[in-house]
Amino acid sequence: MDLIDIEDAGAVRTVTLNRPEKRNALNAEMLELLEAAFTGEPSPDARVVVVKSTGPVFCAGLDLRERLEQGARGAESPIESMLHRIETYPLPVVAIVQGAAIAGGNELALHCDIVVASTDANFGMSLAQIGLAPSWFLAKKLMEVAGPVATKEILLLGDPLPAQRMYDLGLIARVCAPADLAATADAVIERLAANAPLSLVAMKALITREMAFRDDIPHDDIDALVAKTRGSEDSREGVAARLERRQPEFKGR
């Protein structure tokens, strides 16, 4: 069974996370496959890309067990290159979300252009609860879609927000009953596929470029803080505690 399943059907390319037994947690192989799916020029017939997952959970984020085994990393996360590919891919990308979209899963959804979620979905960045911090790149996406007030709620508290709250905040485009998720998503996909392709490409490029101004803000000191957090004793304790399903004991070092 492929960890990432890719299906091309006329105007629609569907990219499916296929690791339901691990809540679709992203390991290194999945990150590489996802990046490859969004590398290169789209086929002439393609109009829209769909990102979805099998099982009851959209994506639980990066594989914490793999991270613990590999040890601390610096400020750059392996997920960033893949998300950048999605963000800058020429075609509109639609995420279909059920269940949890946490940490890397939340970022995966929000880096897509349009998010359609069922009311049983929840979104969050639980990094503060396990002793980690998002990079400049990852936090920038939250600021773009959520603004500073909601970003602080999402990051500092670390508790997941239900899909309806995300919709009310303007972070996702559609929310519906679980039974209506496929039909609601199909309506969005069909509308995109019927629109003028050159217009869609131009509009996505325009929006992406206009939001890129934060990239030029100096942030070496922020990168250093994030690297210190990711290499801390607290981060190792937090990840281990999450895997062992216990409360972490943070020491501030």
Image (spheres, grey):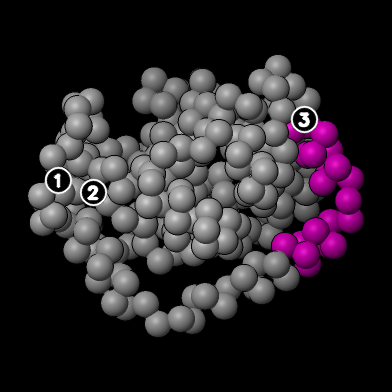
- Could you tell whether 232 is left or right of 221 in the image? left
**Res. 213 image quadrant:** bottom right
Front-most of 131 and 23? Answer: 131
What amino acid is found at the position of numbered circle 1 in the picture? Phe
Residue 128 visible in rendering: yes
Which region of the structure is painted magenta?
Answer: 185-204
Residue 96, image x, y percentages: 64, 34
Front-most of 205 and 248? Answer: 248
Disc 1 target residue: 250
Mark 1 or mark 2: name the one nearer the start of the chain: 2
Tags 2 and 3 touching, CB below 8 Å: no
Question: Depth-wise, is mark 2 or mark 3 nearer the camera?
Answer: 2
Disc 3 target residue: 184
Disc 2 target residue: 131
Tell me, yes or no, whether the highlighted magenta stretch contains residue 112.
no
Name which residue lies at 58% across and 24% down.
Answer: 120
